[in-house]
Structure formats: structure tokens, C-alpha cells
Image (cartoon, rainbow, N blue to C red):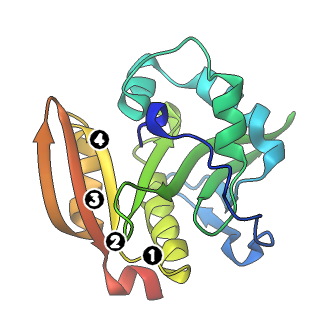
């Protein structure tokens, strides 16, 4: 997802009720416990904190640019969704000082009327544990439940982890690379959205 092209939509519908059916506990490959849940407006500061813990490499892979901190208007936009056309799921863990976000997956309306654009980020220390696959699967399942059946991801051409995840877990319909950015149009696999 290219945040520079994502603008708040003044005509956006009011938010749907908070989708508690999307909340679940997950145990990762290393035995760590995280909770997957829909994002809430009060997650703004936690998004800023998560961004601050990301390596420059991870920030660049997600945003295609590096900023010292997540701009407040971006944090506000990312944390405020309508739970229908725009939805984000966070992976959180409990710490002695409170809840901490370690990953985010989302979909937004894309340029194509019948496809949503997806984006994901997982904190560096939590990568390689299966959390990206969990977020991808849960975001796609939520999208299908809301009538979305095609998705598009924009990723840097050298983001092999994300490209491999999409290839392994979805049915890729189109893949194009231009100027170092790979666009992948895909559909969820039926078994991934009904499990």
C-alpha cells in the first residue's frame, strides 16, 4: 500500500460496529502468544511506537521510503477504519508496561473497484515466526466476509518474503514489476478463507 496515494475519503461511510468475531489468540512458531484483533482509534500511539521499533530496512520494505517517525496524520488515518471498506488487524502482546503492537495487516479500497489493496508489516524481532501468514490469512478472510474477493499488493521487487508468502498462500492472477515495484493481483484460496 502506498500511503502517499491514500487520502481520507470524506464520503466514507460511518464505521460498522467493532467486529469482535475477528479477535483471536495465536501461538507462534516460537511459542509466543499474540492476540489478533481489529485496530481501534486508540491504537494511534501504539502504531507510532511500533514504527519507532522497526528497522530502516523494514520501514523501507513497507512504506517505500524511510521517515524518522510515523507522521501523526498517517497514524490517525491508519488507526481509524470503517471495518467494511477499510479494515486493519493488529497483532498485540501483553508486556509488563501494557499492550504492544508487533504487526499490522490491512486492506483499503484500491484503484480497481473490485479489488482491495493490502499491506502488512511485522516488527523485525517477530519476523519468521508465522505472524505474516496469520495476518495475511485473517485479513483475506475478513475481506471475503465483507464481499471482497480480489486483492492487490504492491511490494518492492526484492521483498522476497512477502512475494513468497503471497505465492504460497494465495492464487496469484497477475504479477508485474515496474521500476522496482512488483504489483501482485491475487485471490484467496478457498480453504484459507473457510478454515
Q: CA distance from mark 4 to mark 3?
A: 11 Å
Residue 50: which quarter of the image? top right
Tag shown at residue 150: 2
Q: Which residue is mark 4?
A: 155
Instruction: Tell me if label 2 and label 1 are in contact, CB under 8 Å.
Output: yes
- Mark 2 or mark 4: name the one nearer the start of the chain: 2
Q: CA distance from mark 1 to mark 4?
A: 20 Å
Q: Seen from this angle, which residue lies furthest front?
A: 11
Q: Which residue is mark 1?
A: 148
User: Residue 80 at what x, y percent from top left?
Assistant: 72, 49
- Which one is closest to the eye, mark 2 or mark 4? 2
Instruction: Tell me if label 2 and label 3 are in contact, CB under 8 Å.
Output: no
Tag shown at residue 54: none
Q: Seen from this angle, which residue lies furthest right?
A: 97
Residue 88: which quarter of the image? bottom right
Q: CA distance from mark 2 to mark 4?
A: 17 Å
Classify mark 4: helix, strand or loop. Answer: strand
Instruction: Tell me if label 2 and label 4 are in contact, CB under 8 Å.
Output: no
Instruction: Report the side of 184 relative to 107 (left or right).
Output: left
Classify mark 2: helix, strand or loop. Answer: loop
| Frontmost residue, 62 versus 152 | 152
- Mark 2 or mark 3: name the one nearer the start of the chain: 2
User: Residue 38 at what x, y percent from top left?
Assistant: 69, 61
Q: Seen from this angle, which residue lies furthest top?
A: 68
User: Residue 86 at what x, y percent from top left?
Assistant: 59, 59
Instruction: Report the side of 76 relative to 154 (left or right).
Output: right
- Which one is closest to the eye, mark 4 or mark 3? 4
The residue shown at (77%, 74%) is: 20
- Which one is closest to the eye, mark 3 or mark 1? 1
Tag shown at residue 166: 3
Q: Residues within 10 Å of mark 3 (few under 14, many from 20)?
A: many
| Frontmost residue, 10 versus 70 | 10
Amino acid at each position: 500500500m502506498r500511503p502517499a496515494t491514500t487520502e481520507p475519503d470524506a464520503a466514507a461511510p460511518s464505521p460498522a460496529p467493532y467486529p469482535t468475531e475477528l479477535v483471536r489468540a495465536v501461538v507462534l512458531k516460537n511459542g509466543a502468544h499474540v492476540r489478533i484483533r481489529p485496530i481501534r482509534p486508540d491504537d494511534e500511539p501504539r502504531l507510532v511506537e511500533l514504527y519507532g521499533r522497526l528497522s530502516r530496512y523494514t520501514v523501507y520494505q513497507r512504506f517505500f521510503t524511510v521517515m524518522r517517525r510515523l507522521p501523526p496524520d498517517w497514524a490517525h488515518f491508519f488507526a481509524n477504519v470503517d471495518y467494511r471498506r477499510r479494515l486493519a488487524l493488529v497483532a498485540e502482546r501483553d508486556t509488563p508496561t501494557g499492550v504492544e503492537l508487533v504487526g499490522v495487516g490491512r486492506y483499503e479500497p484500491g484503484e480497481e473497484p473490485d479489488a482491495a489493496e493490502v499491506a502488512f508489516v511485522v516488527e523485525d524481532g517477530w519476523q519468521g515466526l508465522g505472524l505474516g501468514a496469520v495476518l495475511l490469512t485473517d485479513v483475506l478472510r475478513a475481506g471475503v466476509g465483507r464481499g471482497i474477493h480480489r486483492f492487490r499488493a504492491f511490494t518492492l521487487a526484492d521483498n522476497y518474503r512477502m512475494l513468497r508468502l503471497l505465492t504460497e498462500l494465495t492464487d496469484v492472477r497477475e504479477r508485474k514489476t515496474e521500476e522496482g515495484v512488483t504489483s501482485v493481483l491475487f485471490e484467496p484460496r478457498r480453504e484459507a478463507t473457510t478454515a
